[in-house]
Image (cartoon, rainbow, N blue to C red):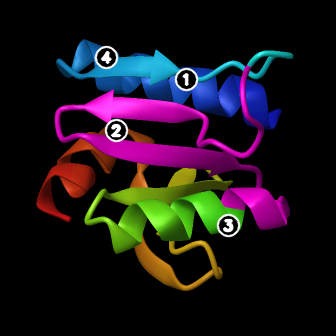
Amino acid sequence: MSESKDTRDVCKIMEKQGALVFAIVGGHLQEAGWPDRYVAPPGVWLEFKGKKGKPTPKQRYILHSLRLRDVPAYVARHVDGMVQLEWEDGTVLEVAPQERLLDVLKKM
């Protein structure tokens, strides 16, 4: 599957579970580098990546800057039907089935 389809599927699951998922769609008026989605509850920013995708330097900077301000922000990597949550440097924090991602985020 593609990263965008995987992302849409995961977001639909979280919405069915009661979360509001706000998509950040880049455009000429928006600063580049902000995470793909904001999920509430629990109030977390997610930058979705495919199995081999890497955050850009600007994305890493923004994710790190959010965390320094006590704002939860993670890379959410699609890996074989699972979602792997990482810090911006690639450190793996959790791996969960797509259906459990919202539960995992609420506990982080």
**Residue receiving disc 2:** 99
| Vertical relation: 87 (above or below) 56 | below
Quadrant position of the N terminus in the picture: top right
Q: Which mark is residue 15?
A: 4
Q: Which residue is mark 1?
A: 9
User: What residue type is disc 2 on?
Assistant: Glu
Mark 4 vs 1, N-terminal side? 1
Left or right of 42 in this view: 76: right
Q: Nearer the viewer, mark 1 or mark 3?
A: 3
Q: Are marks 2 and 3 in contact (CB under 8 Å)?
A: no
Crowding near the residue tagged with mark 2, few <14, some 14–19, many ≥20 C-alpha atoms within 10 Å: some
Label 3 environment density (alpha carbons within 10 Å; few <14, some 14–19, many ≥20): many
Q: Is residue 48 magenta?
A: yes
Quarter holding the C terminus is bottom left
Q: Give the mark toward the camera: 2 or 3.
A: 3
Judge by depth and name the residue closer to the eye, 3 or 43.
43
Dot 1 lies on which element?
helix
Q: Residue at x 24, y 56 (%)?
A: 104
Q: Residues within 10 Å of mark 1 (few under 14, many from 20)?
A: some
